[in-house]
Image (tube, helix red, strand yellow):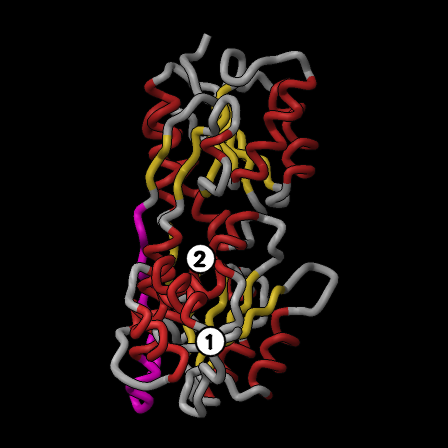
Amino acid sequence: MTKNRTSMADIAAHAGVSTATVSRVFNGVGQVSADTRRKVLTAIDELGYDRPTPERTPDTPTIGIIVPELTNPIFASFTHHLQKEVSRAGGISLIRTQTPGATSEFDHLSSLLDHRVSGLIFVSGRHADLLADLGPYFNVTQHSIPFVTINGARPEIPAPDFSTGDALGIRAAVTHLHELGHTRIALLGGRTHIVPALRKAEAFTQIMGELIGDHAPIIEETFYTYEAAAAHTASLIERGVTAIITGSDLQALGAIRTITSMGLSVPDDISIIGFDDTFLMSRLSPGLTTVHQPVASIVSAAVRNLFEALATPNSAPIHEDYVFSPDLVVRGTTAHAR
């Protein structure tokens, strides 16, 4: 960037600060609060200028973040908020994705350890799989590298976990449908060797028994994808269900596609509830009734906990569960049962 008065003034106006503050950020001199500096950097990015360099010092923490594939909007949301919160805390993010069929989570982990990261964040990773080998997580502990997990608590792992209350979300969804007169309700979720899917299934069985007296409700296990849900929905309709609760918004969209292709209507014939409340779900027609994951709150707490651990390197890692309450967002895909 050419540091002329006009560009400085543009950035200052965009950020709502003085040109002197912009100058201090560029030159790295004087006192500028973290929030003000972030506003200036955001303005620089949005206006298309080059950021001042270097931003990183030898003491800047590097945080390895491993997430599943980013084609599911919920993981893109977690990644966006994690990068923002790590930056807010003064760190640099190294983001890796564990797309099926490509580089595995533990290959990424080995690479991040070679890069001598300061801390690690695992989102819906192998820690959430009841069939997975947990040895690599204990290896991280032996390296004295603090880490946290998100959405997939395992008491065996000596690290704090920050998760959405899956059971609370399913209970709210079933209660809503019951109040609308539905009794033939199915859960179209994930494979139950994955912790969040198991918790959803267990909660669904319990609340269906309590409210409706159905102690063996219809539960269909599949992948958290549009295509998988679309393929499994027809058989649920054939079994006479009037409402379907899905394990993700993508699954809900797949279910809706199959329902409409069968000449049926959502919600007049079949009610649908998603899970995640990802971007654009409120913009659909009709808008998707779904369980909102409190992503921002989960991420903020997880990053804060990790940086506290970085500040106290001699503290022993322990497992703690932090459960965040989801909200049912009622929109247009649920209606009274016929």
Query: Which of pointers 1 and 2 indicates the residue nearer the eye?
Result: 1
Q: Position of residue 335 (x, y in %)?
A: 42, 16
Near mark 2 (Cα within 10 A), the count class, few <14, some 14-19 or many ≥20, is: many
Element marked by disc 2: loop
Near mark 1 (Cα within 10 A), the count class, few <14, some 14-19 or many ≥20, is: few
In this view, the residue in front, 266 or 86, is 86
In this view, the residue in front, 334 or 131, is 334
Q: Position of residue 104 (x, y in %)?
A: 67, 69
Element marked by disc 1: loop
Q: Which residue is mark 2?
A: 151
Q: Which residues are magenta?
A: 309-325
Residue 162 versus residue 29 in the image, above or below: above
Tell me the quarter of the picture where residue 176 sits.
top left
Q: Mark on residue 3?
A: 1
Would residue 145 appear left or right of 254 to someone viewing this image?
Answer: left
Would residue 314 appear left or right of 127 to someone viewing this image?
Answer: left
Q: Residue at x 44, y 40 (%)?
A: 277
- Amino acid type at mark 1: Lys
> Residue 325: in sight, yes or no?
yes
In this view, the residue in front, 144 or 10, is 10
Q: Mark on residue 334?
A: none
Instruction: For the residues labelled 1 and 2, say whether their Cβ atoms are less than 8 Å apart.
Output: no
Determine if the magenta segment contains residue 319: yes
- Amino acid type at mark 2: Asn
Mark with earlier residue (1, 2): 1
Residue 263 versus residue 290 in the image, above or below: above
